[in-house]
Amino acid sequence: MTVERIVPNLTVSDLSLAVREHTTALGLRVVMDHGWTITLEGAGGRQLSLITRDATAPVNPDVSVFVDDIGAAYDAATTAGVEILHPLTDEDWGVTRFCYRDSSGNVVNVGAHSG
């Protein structure tokens, strides 16, 4: 399994306002908008996601980690004994993912693009 990218997720109360703030302050542009989460991107492909409430998981993730082999990532997480909060799921928006909580309480969304 290879980690392809890591994206911090900020929980926000007002998505439109947060987008305006971060695009203006940092010069980022919107590259994905699902209505409940928006990903912004800057030069070199650096990304930041803003989220109001996760569409299917019980909690908002603090960070998203995208991998090339989601099955191997899930197996590694279960072997590590971390708390799985959201099972391995094929989501409607084209991502297969799961979420876990580490021993410090951080919620990690692990995903791979489907298809």
Image (cartoon, helix red, strand yellow):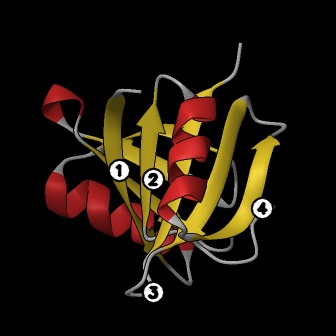
Residue at the spot 34% in from the left edge and 33% down from the top edge: 3
Label 4 packing within 10 angstroms: few (<14), some (14-19), many (20+): some
Name the disc covering residue 7, or none.
Answer: 1
- Residue 72 shown left or right of residue 90 in the figure: left
Q: Residues within 10 Å of mark 2 (few under 14, many from 20)?
A: many
Question: Of marks 2 and 3, which one's residue comes earlier in the chain?
Answer: 2
Left or right, residue 78 beside residue 27? right
Locate the C terminus by quadrant.
top right
- Mark 4 → mark 1, Cα distance in angstroms: 17 Å
State the residue position of label 2. Answer: 64
Q: Nearer the viewer, mark 4 or mark 3?
A: 3
Point out which mark residue 105 bears.
3
Which residue does the image show at 68% across and 73% down from the upper left? Answer: 53
- Give x and y (percent) for residue 31: 45, 34
| Mark closer to the observer (3, 1) | 3
Q: Mark 1–mark 2 contact, CB under 8 Å?
A: yes
Cα distance between the residues tagged 2 and 4: 14 Å
Q: CA distance from mark 4 to mark 3?
A: 20 Å
Total count of labels: 4
